[in-house]
Amino acid sequence: MTAGRTDRILVLTGTCLVLIFLGFDQLVHKLLSDKGLGASVAPAVTGTDEASEQAFVTLSQGGLPGDPRAAFAFERSDLEYAATAAFEPTELASFADHKQREHGLDRTLAPPVALRWNRGPQGLLIEWDGSPRNDAVAREVADNPLLRTGYRIYRWRADQEPAAVGKVPLDQTSFLDAEVGLQGGRVFYSVVTVLEGMIGNRDSLIESERSDVLTVDLEDRFQLRVLSGDATRATIEVTTDGPVGPRSMAFPVEPGSPIGALVSVDGMPADFQTGLTVTSIELVPATREERVRHPVFAPDGSRARDESGFVHREDVRTVSIQRIVVRCVDARGSTRTLTLDPS
């Protein structure tokens, strides 16, 4: 290849590179101009909320360097809510959610205080006092049909995680826990103030800090009686305090069976769940004492009498029986034994 031809190839190659860079420069400025972003552009980010809020792309001033990628420098900057040109709707919703939180609604919510309880035939009544700090939040969302304030009640036992068992509006400072169960033991409650609804086009829930924990020591609200049985099965009667007085129901059980159930009485649910599970049923040899009455006769052979009527003599004797023994355990591992001496 001659030197002249080589020079012409080098010149053409250089010219093409210049045109490529000039075209890229015009293309970038055209895109920026079309979006009306001037010298700054916030690209559509599809990553995390943090990226959506903090990734801000700034175009270098004063022309492009040799490497086109060096024209963009990532800077950490706060975004304004109105900068909507280059963000997806879901990202804007996330940003609005964060802006709503930045207004302090979650920090303004205050938990209730002075939790107390009282047990009645309908269940366990939990009461508390509201905080005046929540009045401002209630006024702020009063005219917004998409937001509402209230309380959420959590309950748990020693071997459980706290679980929400109910919620009430902000103007109600009590909750009747009708599902606490019949079994005794220690139960814990805590209440939080909540703001929930649509925030930034998303279904959201903001909770205050939890209230102080309320500890409730409960007694069993049932009585058990073995009605019959053999070495493999038994029938146990469960008696509870119903809304209009005591009520009883018999349940057949065997090892592994729960004692009691949630049943329907006159079309209404009735709770006979004791929280106990049968572990074994046995027939155990035992004895019992019986009193036997014998009539007393006079010397002439007639029945002896006194002012109260015929006279009797009592003897005590010991008889052998097969005692029915039902052993059961509750959720805490505590055991109890039920027995029946057949008549």
Image: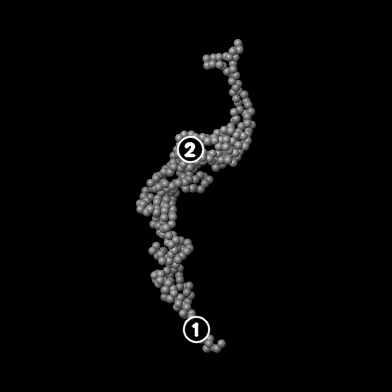
Determine whether 310 is above or below 94 in the image.
above
From the viewer's perspective, tell me whether residue 338 is left or right of residue 110: right
Lateral position of residue 131 relative to residue 277, left or right: left
Q: Mark 1 = which residue?
A: 12
Q: Secondary structure at mark 2?
A: loop
Quadrant holding the N terminus: bottom right
Q: Residue at x 47, y 48 (%)?
A: 164
Outermost residue toward the top? 300
Numbered badge on residue 266? 2
Amino acid beneath label 1: Leu
| The furthest residue to the front | 267
Residue 117 shows in this picture: no
- Count up the numbered dots: 2
In space, the residues marked 2 and 1 are separated at their CA atoms by 98 Å
> Is 284 on the left or on the right of 214, as rendered?
right
Residue 29 location, quadrant = bottom left
Q: Amino acid at mark 2?
A: Asp
Image coords of residue 308 (percent x, y): 52, 16
197 to 254, vertically: above or below:
below
Residue at 49 percent across and 45 percent down: it is 156
Residue that appears at 42% across and 50% down: 194
